[in-house]
Image (cartoon, rainbow, N blue to C red):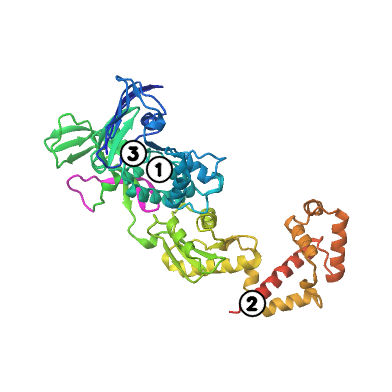
């Protein structure tokens, strides 16, 4: 398999000049937004036409400006995966996949069924893109692309619009797909992590110009060009003066450096990646006494902005120091309880969601329960925990086809607090199921008065109910009246809004509340009586739960 690209195309502000030769390994084009990456793919696919040059795939000429060859996109055997997957919103899964087929129409139905099976889309055939999760949309787009049996596939920033959780899952799926694909692949991305992960060979593009090309790992280690070093993530640069065969003076850092390799005569800059620097207790060769200008903590490392203590006009450098202590980071405990027993898909789905997070702990605790101990960034808040919980509910619903409750603890400042965090998550789950059964997510810090009632002895709760209701019980209230009461409470004792939502006349509500007052001696239109009645309803729910779930 071989891909050869040598094209030019005049664009707004610059001329795109790209020359690529595949070596059989996945190819990448790394560059900033607007550098011409996507235009290169569009030219290969035949969506755009270069001004000049040549494109060849497996000895088949797709474009040759001199010979006036310019095959149509459908004749090129090229698969194109767009940034947003470009699925047709008004077509079902099976119809979207069928759009990519180029063979005999009499085999179309069987081919579509085959690719639905291959890409694990069974049961989703009649769904529309808007009814699919991000991972499912990606698989549909891949199936549509691959049903055309392309000789080369083009991936145009396939993960750029995704958040961290979904991106991890879909990158893993993409890696599995690429491991099985035997053709050529070209990925364009602005993410150096994606380029490093997926591409064996890399071209770095800047303003339409190919700065350098080579084996990905070697380019990251020795970019050779200042702009290429920047695009591969190096942050520390200094202009230099050659001082000897193996020595340079870094002007911007006021630092003499000794080199292993011979210093070329045309050297202009030196770059040092922050991850390659090491702390030292004393001075020596290639050492610099520094002062800390700024400190930033991230998930897995400490970042320091350092400056030479000599002062003056010295430029600072970034030092990235990995965290070495597992216990120094915050954690939170999540408990997931599926509403179906022995749901085998739930655990697999959750492990897949967090597959790239190697410092998280995930395991089943019984037929319905799953525990997640998740490492947190220092910047993460309770709002982030809530978002994770809702993400889990949504992903279990779409990927595992199961309903679940998810509860989470307070932040555990260190590993010694994890037992307490587990108790908090367990309490949140129990309290949530008792008092807030209409919800799926429960945070320990959001349990409100339900947590207080949960801690009371059942005997005390029964005494309270006897005092409030005397000979009466809530079970004697008909369903219509109960719905009326709950709607009234949800609307903050607003009669007009309750009347509107229930489609009943205001006088009808008044009649129901007066009837309730005669029965229980409480007028829920008054705040104190409403509070008492609400508490009584919650206490009754707690008593019933306690009797059905004895400890």
| Looking at the image, residue 458 lies above or below residue 119 | below
Q: Disc 3 vs disc 2: which is toward the camera? A: 3
Task: Find residue 48 and report its image quarter.
Answer: top left
Kindly identify the residue that appears in the image at 46 percent across and 42 percent down.
Answer: 106
Residue 364: x and y, percent? Answer: 46, 68
Kindly identify the residue that appears in the image at 38 percent across and 24 percent down.
Answer: 49
First reached walking from the N terminus: tag 3 or tag 2 = 3
| Quarter of the N terminus within the rendering | top left
Residue 504: x and y, percent? Answer: 83, 54
Q: Which mark is residue 146?
A: 1
Kindly identify the residue that appears in the image at 66 percent across and 72 percent down.
Answer: 542
Q: Is residue 397 left or right of residue 241?
A: right
Q: Which mark is residue 548?
A: 2
Residue named by callout 3: 151
The residue nearer to you, when weighing 301 against 188, is: 188
First reached walking from the N terminus: tag 1 or tag 3 = 1
Residues in magenta? 281-303
| Looking at the image, residue 453 lies above or below residue 145 | below
Residue 272 visible, this orientation: no
Q: CA distance from mark 1 to mark 2?
A: 54 Å
Task: Name the outermost residue toward the left.
Answer: 245
| Looking at the image, residue 479 lies above or below residue 107 | below
Indicate the secondary structure of the residue bearing disc 1: helix
Q: Is residue 282 magenta?
A: yes
């Amino acid at each position: 398999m071989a891909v050869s690209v040598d094209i030019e195309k005049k664009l707004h502000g610059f001329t795109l000049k790209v020359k690529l030769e595949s070596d059989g390994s996945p190819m990448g084009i790394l560059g900033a937004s607007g550098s011409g990456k996507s235009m290169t793919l569009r030219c290969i696919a035949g969506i755009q036409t270069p001004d000049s040059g040549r494109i060849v795939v497996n000895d088949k000429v797709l474009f040759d400006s001199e010979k006036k060859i310019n095959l149509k996109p459908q004749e090129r055997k090229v698969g194109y995966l767009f940034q947003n997957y470009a699925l047709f919103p008004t077509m079902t899964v099976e119809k979207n996949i069928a759009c990519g087929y180029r063979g005999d129409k009499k085999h179309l139905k069987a081919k579509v069924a085959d690719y639905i099976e291959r890409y694990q889309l069974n049961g989703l055939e009649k769904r529309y893109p808007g009814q699919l999760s991000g991972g499912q949309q990606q698989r549909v787009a891949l199936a549509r692309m691959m049903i055309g049996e392309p000789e080369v596939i083009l991936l145009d920033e396939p993960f750029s619009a995704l958040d961290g959780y979904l991106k991890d899952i879909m990158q893993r799926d993409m890696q599995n797909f690429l491991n099985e694909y035997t053709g050529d692949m070209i990925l364009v991305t602005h993410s150096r992590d994606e380029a490093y992960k997926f591409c064996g060979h890399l071209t770095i593009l800047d303003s339409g110009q190919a700065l350098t090309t080579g084996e990905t790992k070697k380019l990251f280690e020795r970019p050779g060009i200042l702009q290429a070093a920047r695009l591969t993530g190096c942050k520390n640069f200094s202009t230099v003066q050659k001082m000897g065969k193996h020595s340079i003076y870094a002007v911007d850092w006021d630092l003499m450096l000794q080199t292993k390799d011979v210093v070329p005569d045309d050297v202009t800059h030196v770059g040092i990646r922050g991850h390659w620097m090491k702390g030292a207790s004393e001075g020596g060769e290639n050492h610099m006494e520094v002062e800390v200008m700024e400190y930033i903590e991230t998930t897995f490392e400490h970042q320091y902005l350092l400056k030479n203590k000599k002062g003056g006009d010295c430029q600072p450098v970034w030092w990235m120091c990995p965290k070495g202590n597992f216990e120094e980071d915050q954690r939170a405990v999540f408990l997931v309880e599926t509403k179906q027993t022995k749901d085998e898909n739930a655990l697999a789905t959750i492990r897949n969601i967090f597959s790239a997070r190697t410092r998280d702990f995930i395991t089943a605790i019984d037929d319905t329960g799953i525990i997640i101990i998740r490492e947190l960034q220092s910047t993460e808040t309770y709002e982030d925990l809530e978002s994770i919980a809702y993400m889990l509910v949504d992903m279990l619903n779409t990927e595992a086809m199961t309903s679940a409750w998810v509860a989470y603890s307070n932040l555990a400042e260190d590993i010694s607090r994890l037992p307490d965090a587990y108790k908090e998550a367990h309490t949140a789950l129990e309290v949530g199921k008792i008092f807030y059964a209409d919800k799926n997510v429960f945070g320990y810090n959001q349990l409100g008065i339900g947590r207080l009632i949960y801690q009371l002895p059942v005997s005390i709760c029964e005494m309270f109910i006897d005092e409030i209701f005397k000979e009466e019980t809530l079970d004697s209230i008909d369903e219509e009246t109960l719905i009326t009461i709950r709607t009234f409470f949800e609307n903050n004792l607003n009669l007009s809004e309750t009347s509107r939502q229930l489609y009943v006349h205001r006088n009808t509500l008044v009649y129901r509340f007066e009837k309730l007052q005669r029965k229980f001696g409480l007028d829920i239109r008054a705040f104190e009586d409403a509070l008492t009645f609400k508490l009584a309803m919650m206490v009754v729910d707690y008593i019933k739960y306690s009797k059905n779930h004895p400890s």
